[in-house]
Image: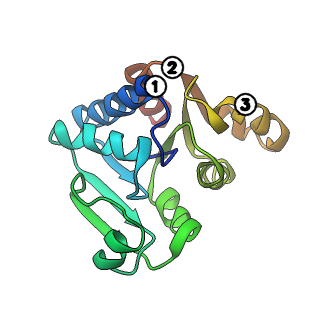
Amino acid sequence: MKIAVCGSNKELDKEITKKAFEIGKELAKREVLLLTGSGKGYPYKAAKGAFSNNGKVFGVSPAKDEEEHINMYNFPTDAFTKIEFTNLGIPGRNLPLVKEANAIIIISGQIGSLNEFTIAFHDSKVIGILENSGQITDIIEEIAKICDKNGEKENIIYSSDPKELVSLVLNKLK
């Protein structure tokens, strides 16, 4: 099972940072491979949470190689079991990131997270939203209502509790 954690590349709120870390720990506990865009912010905290719980974390980098990943993008390497260098830039790496995942979880976020949401929504993937995490998560429900054509919005799960969110996403995948 593979779940991509997407979201803000900045940690805007200490409580949300803790919740992101908990999401990662919970995914690792359930032996789920955590995927991220290999950047910073809340997805990185989720990666650190998974890594701290002996989980596997796969980064999908926009860079062509590790040197560009570190020096041009200023992205971390310490919380990843493996990093795939796509040379697709941002937002190009979002497509393989979401396509590779069975589901995604969004924590806060802006345009990149919205792009990841629309890819997953279009593919009718299960989407977990960490409620009250701010930014686009505050308007996702309205976007889903507007864009829903074939019941895709039924694949979206909302919770402000990290453990419950992971549990609901995994149950929806069964």
The numbered mark, 1 or 2, whose residue comes first in the sequence reads: 2
Q: Position of residue 48 (x, y in %)?
A: 26, 42
Q: Position of residue 1 (x, y in %)?
A: 35, 46
- Helix, strand or loop at label 3? It is helix
Q: State the CA–CA distance, disc 3 to disc 1.
A: 16 Å
Q: State the CA–CA distance, disc 2 to disc 3.
A: 14 Å
Q: Label 1 sits on what residue type?
A: Leu
Residue picked out by circle 1:
165
Q: Residue at x 36, y 31 (%)?
A: 23
* Eye-nearest disc, 1 or 2: 2
Asked which quadrant contains residue 60, the reply is bottom left
Residue picked out by circle 3:
141
Q: Is residue 108 left or right of residue 4?
A: right
Image quarter where the C terminus lies is top left
Q: Label 2 sits on what residue type?
A: Ser
The numbered mark, 3 or 1, whose residue comes first in the sequence reads: 3
Residue picked out by circle 2:
160
Residue 32 vertical placement versus 81 (above, below): above
Residue 32 vertical placement versus 72 (above, below): above
Q: Is residue 1 visible?
A: no
Q: Residue at x 46, y 25 (%)?
A: 165
